[in-house]
Image (cartoon, rainbow, N blue to C red):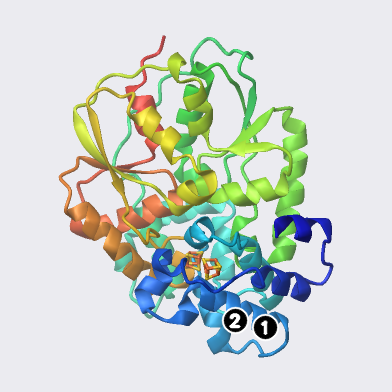
Amino acid sequence: MNDSMDSMPLENPQHRIAALADQCVQCGLCLPVCPTYALDGNESESPRGRIAIAAALARGQVSASAALREPLDHCLGCLGCERVCPAGVRYEALLIETRALLGPAPERPRFLLEIVKRPRLNRWVQRLARWTGASHWPRRILPASWRAALALASSHNTSKPNPSPPLPRKVGRKAGIVALFPGCAASVQDADAERAAQTLLTAAGFQVVRMPAFCCGALDRHDGAIREGDAAAARLQRAWTKSGADCLVTVTPGCLSTLRGALPGVRVDDPYRLLAEHIDELSFEPLPARFALHVPCTQANVARSDTALMQLLQRIPQLALTRLPAPPYCCGAAGSHVLQFPERAARLRESVLMQIETLDVQGLLSSNMGCRLHLAAGLQEKAPALPTLHPLTLLVQQWIPS
Ligand code: SF4
Ligand code: SF4
């Protein structure tokens, strides 16, 4: 299917959507892995239902009423469906094309997202959240999206990681040059993980070049704001060319798909696979503890680096891990979904929190910033003392400099 589509590019977006949708044989094998189908039990909130709606919209058989676009707006983009589909339906491409056709959802908190995309303003929101506490704002003053954003920002650093060790002295070129892309919100919220990646990649023999911090365009592209997404892609291409690197990494798997789309032919990965390829260069202090390892949808379905991450964490002697979540996976954070639909996001999170509650663990690890903050915000009520960390932060804490 992909070959014929690629060899005959379709200029018209409606034709492209219809061609993508026609690959679906309606077998329903994707339904059991779809978190929104599990939440509502409606066919229209399933991958198969969304594909049928997209096809009908693209063919002009129905008009884009609020009731029809709502299931498309609710989609988390977790790509559990794409991973299991036996017909090879390119669901992500179909979703992005369809949202571009419809334009951003009415619930999209544009102003808030413009702040999230700017690291300096993002720091300001983080300070405001820590100063006020998210729950102290009366409902009538702040819209739900803002209260959700403050809850995420104030959940940061439920643990206090040790300061990162200094960069290793040997800054080699033997393993290649890596461009580290900090992103937008992640450059603020995942600053510790970014420093950890820099340290560990250098120790593994890479030269690391830090790129400027800006939004990769995922927030816009996944919400149907394609012009803004294209502008971000152009900025990224310029920054990549300047970097002189061999490959690009991000510590946030949620950005990976957009980064790969903007840089065709470039190796774009998360740090785990690179580190796992040079695992013999790294050694770690023992840690006699049990942690829950939350594997975000984008890490499992896009980065596909969960095995490499497990390999690295298992190099920490005495560390025991329990992998989460059980299907149908998504915690509900899903880019801007947690800001657009905070009530649905909280319902999706509940099943993951219940899984954590049944475990006797000393901490929670999750690579994706949005997932980690969303889960940490939920844990503030249920298990406020449980630290939440990026796995790279734990790895660098235990790393033994050579
Ligand atoms: S698994 Fe693939 S072919 Fe089957 S219903 Fe889902 S999207 Fe369609
Ligand atoms: S991307 Fe996730 S939420 Fe959306 S249809 Fe596929 S499985 Fe369901």
Report the side of 353 relative to 48 (left or right). left
Task: Kindly tell me whether residue 270 is visible in this rendering.
Answer: yes
Which residue is rendered at x = 77% and y = 35% of the image?
A: 241
Q: CA distance from mark 1 to mark 2?
A: 6 Å
Q: Is residue 285 above or below residue 250?
A: above
Quarter of the image with the N terminus in it: bottom right
Quadrant of the image where one finds ligand 1:
bottom right
Q: Which amino acid type is shown beneath numbered disc 1?
A: Leu
Say whether marks 1 and 2 touch (CB < 8 Å).
yes
Q: Is residue 215 above or below residue 306?
A: below
Q: Which amino acid type is shown beneath numbered disc 2?
A: Ile
Disc 2 is placed on an element classified as helix
In percent of width and height, residue 55 lies at 66, 79
Q: Closer to the camera, 95 or 142?
A: 95
- Disc assigned to residue 57: 1
The quadrant in which residue 245 appears is top right
Label 2 CA crowd tier, 10 Å (few <14, some 14–19, many 20+): many
Disc 1 is placed on an element classified as helix
| Residue that numbered label 2 is attached to | 53
